[in-house]
Image: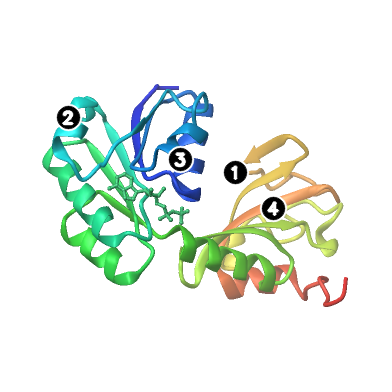
Amino acid sequence: MKITQVAVIGLGRFGTTVATTLYQMGHDVLAIDINPDKVQELAGQVTYAVAADATDESSLKELGIEKFEYAVVAIGSNTEASIMVSVLLKSLNIGVVIARAVSKLQGDTLERIEVDKVVYPESERGRALAHDLFLPGIQQYMELTSTYGISKIKVPARFISQTLKNSNFNNLRDRYGVALIAIQRGEDIILNPDENQTLTSNDTLIIAGPDEKISDIVGPTNINPGE
Ligand code: ADP
């Protein structure tokens, strides 16, 4: 894997998770927060953790930020700081600037100053959770658009011991209007499975398609109130 240098600015819950995860993945992570306590908490969990005001250009330059390929602006609640820092990083020609938005106005403003990607972790997670909980039978959901996503579903009982062909999964796009991307069988992933694969009760299906088509496949939920 290519090791990337990433600066993460703003070490609230979101920034801390991004920074420590990237570091655990083997990347070089410079974590910056204006609050020295936040920086202290992260010592040893990232490559460098530094207390600095990221709206201050000279502080950023002193940290050698211009050499970074990626920067994540994880400041959420302080909109003004999030926008100022993002503008500054773009003007310093950081390759890719990813900024977190907590409101539509903040997101629209970040888009206008041409950050490379705006993420809305709260609303994305909220929507994924709504799908996880209320699209029946779905174990995990990744939204692609508001009505289309990739779902992980436990193999429906009617397909167990059937080949994909017999269960009409071979030509999934035609029969069900979705695409079967992979079967997860224990620790194995069978990508783009062959029509002769027989489904077992331990299988999980990874399917891309419109929400209502996926609901048709999984059938009614077995999660009931009070369980
Ligand atoms: P979360 O919702 O993920 O907990 P917050 O938006 O509340 O995140 O936290 C943002 C973090 O960004 C805070 O730790 C705050 O100290 C930091 N921060 C705010 N302004 C600046 C700045 N100018 N420079 C560096 N860090 C900042």
| Residue placed most toward the observer, 206 or 36 | 36
Q: Which amino acid does the dot numbered 3 rest on?
A: Lys
Disc 3 versus disc 4: nearer the observer: 3
Label annotation for residue 32:
none
Of the numbered discs 4 and 2, the one sitting upstream in the chain is: 2
How far apart are the alpha carbons under marks 2 and 1?
47 Å
How far apart are the alpha carbons under marks 3 and 4?
41 Å
Of the numbered discs 1 and 4, the one sitting upstream in the chain is: 1
Label annotation for residue 205:
4
| Residue placed most toward the observer, 169 or 109 | 109
Measured from the top left, where is residue 138 in percent x and y? Answer: 69, 63
* Residue labelled with disc 2: 61
Secondary-structure class at tag 4: strand
Is 172 on the left-hand or right-hand side of 54?
A: right
How far apart are the alpha carbons under marks 3 and 1?
44 Å
How far apart are the alpha carbons under marks 3 and 2?
21 Å
* Residue labelled with disc 3: 38
Circle 3 Cα neighbour tier, 10 Å, few/some/many (<14 / 14–19 / ≥20): some
Q: Are marks 2 and 1 in contact (CB under 8 Å)?
A: no
Disc 2 versus disc 1: nearer the observer: 2
- Determine whether 56 is above or below 108 in the image: above
Of the numbered discs 2 and 1, the one sitting upstream in the chain is: 2
